[in-house]
Amino acid sequence: MAAAAGDVCGAVPGSRAGAGAGAAAAAAAEARFISSAKGKGLFATKNIRKGETVFVEKPVVSSQFLWNALYNYRACDHCLRALETAEENAQRLLGKSSLVLPHPEQCSIRKDLHQQCPRCQVTYCSAECRQAALEQYHHVLCLGPSRDDPTHPLNKLQEAWRNMHYPPETSSIMLMARMVATIKQAKDKEWWIKTFSQFCNKTANEEEEIVHKLLGDKFKGQLELLRLLFTEALYDEHLSRWFTPEGFRSLFALVGTNGQGIGTSSLSQWVHACDALDLPMLQREELDAFIDQLYKDIEKGELETLPSVQGPGEFLSNHSCIPNAETSFPENNFLLHLTALEDIEAGEEICISYLDCCQRERSRHSRNKILRENYLFTCSCPKCLAQADDADLTSDEEEEGEGETDDAELEDEMTDV
């Protein structure tokens, strides 16, 4: 159950320009510079067949949404893998601790592998994730015994963010914190600075629009408060520009437009595993009926809960209204799988869509209105170019116009009679 996410770190599927494809991507695709306005794109280095996995990539940085974490949706602090079992997931969503799921062996959660940071007690799904976090950013961000201290600079920063950015969440200030911490801990700081700077290609006015969208009408005062708290918690001379008003706005815009939402759910993983079971017909019907009823009960539940662990991460790939690839998170963590939706020839750009299926069927004007509002660009994919001469009406306006025409025709018919 995935959250929506933007270009390289937040919400709305996709990422505007690669921070460099991972090693797994090297064989089938590579990042290439397109233009200063568009940044980089992902291109096939060989022929790729429909249904083939182009690559599996982990984000540059990721972090669980702060409200999501506050509501006790337990997830690995590094890879966002759900830490609660499928049964615990269902019990929480229904507020029913007595619920028992059949086939518990199909749950993939391994609690025996979970580990905590010995200083601050944040939890990881494995020793590998704990070590990876420690080596990349956690040494800087570990709160130790101050984890629950509201006066600690990092806690003050997170509280301020929650008070400005309410659910449904689309980004997290902790992505920016982990970016800074990653550079602070890195041996090759310039490489990381260059990597992150590849995502910054917005004008000052565009950056301001993004900040306004994330923080609302009072965004200027709120942005300055966040900058001061961010500086108090994380200032570093190597990144001094990021702590200036202009640099912080650029960093904020980077996080606001370059994000892929990540959703992980132990319950959905259990359902997929149950679907694959080879069962006698009667048992299959009973299990399917149980799962159908379970989801109906969750949907009509009065609890204000979310079924999945949600968070933003930084990935890559440009948008098209007729995408030739799609992203998914089948491993129940932050690992993004890019899969071809059609045959892709060597040298062809690999594009995903930042719009959902329904949005892609709307008019060109409606699609670009959504893209401009959320990602500050106008699409020039083949579909949009082919519809360039269409009237500049949103789909809603078109429907209203059609309704008016129908009413007028009906009135004429009645007058004729």
Image: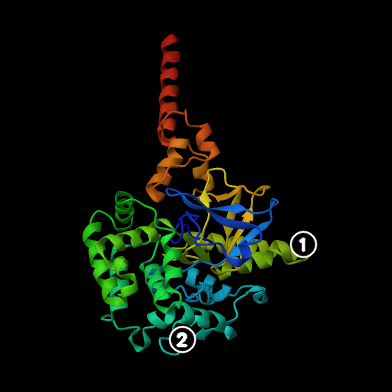
Q: Which residue is mark 1?
A: 281
Q: Earlier in the sequence, mark 2 or mark 1?
A: 2
The C terminus, quarter of image: top left
- At label 2, which amino acid type do we have? Cys
Q: Nearer the viewer, mark 2 or mark 1?
A: 2
Residue 402 vs 15, above or below: the answer is: above
- The image's colouring method is rainbow
Q: Residue at x 44, y 77 (%)?
A: 186
Q: Report the residue marked by disc 2.
A: 117
Residue 134 seen: yes
State yes or no: discs 2 and 1 in contact (Cβ < 8 Å).
Answer: no
| Residue 203 appears left or right of 310 | left
Neighbour tally class for label 1: few under 14, some 14-19, many 20 plus, Cα within 10 Å: few
Q: Is residue 272 placed above or below 205 in the rendered structure? A: below
Identified by mark 1, the residue type is Met
Residue 305: image location, x then y, percent:
44, 66
In the rendering, at what x and y percent does residue 264 appear? 53, 67
For the point 43% across and 49% down, the residue is 36
Q: Secondary structure at mark 2?
A: loop
Q: Is residue 223 above or below residue 148?
A: above
Separation of residues labelled 2 and 1 (CA atoms): 47 Å
Residue 151 spot, x, y in % from top left: 25, 81
Tell me where residue 217 appears, x and y as whole percent: 24, 53
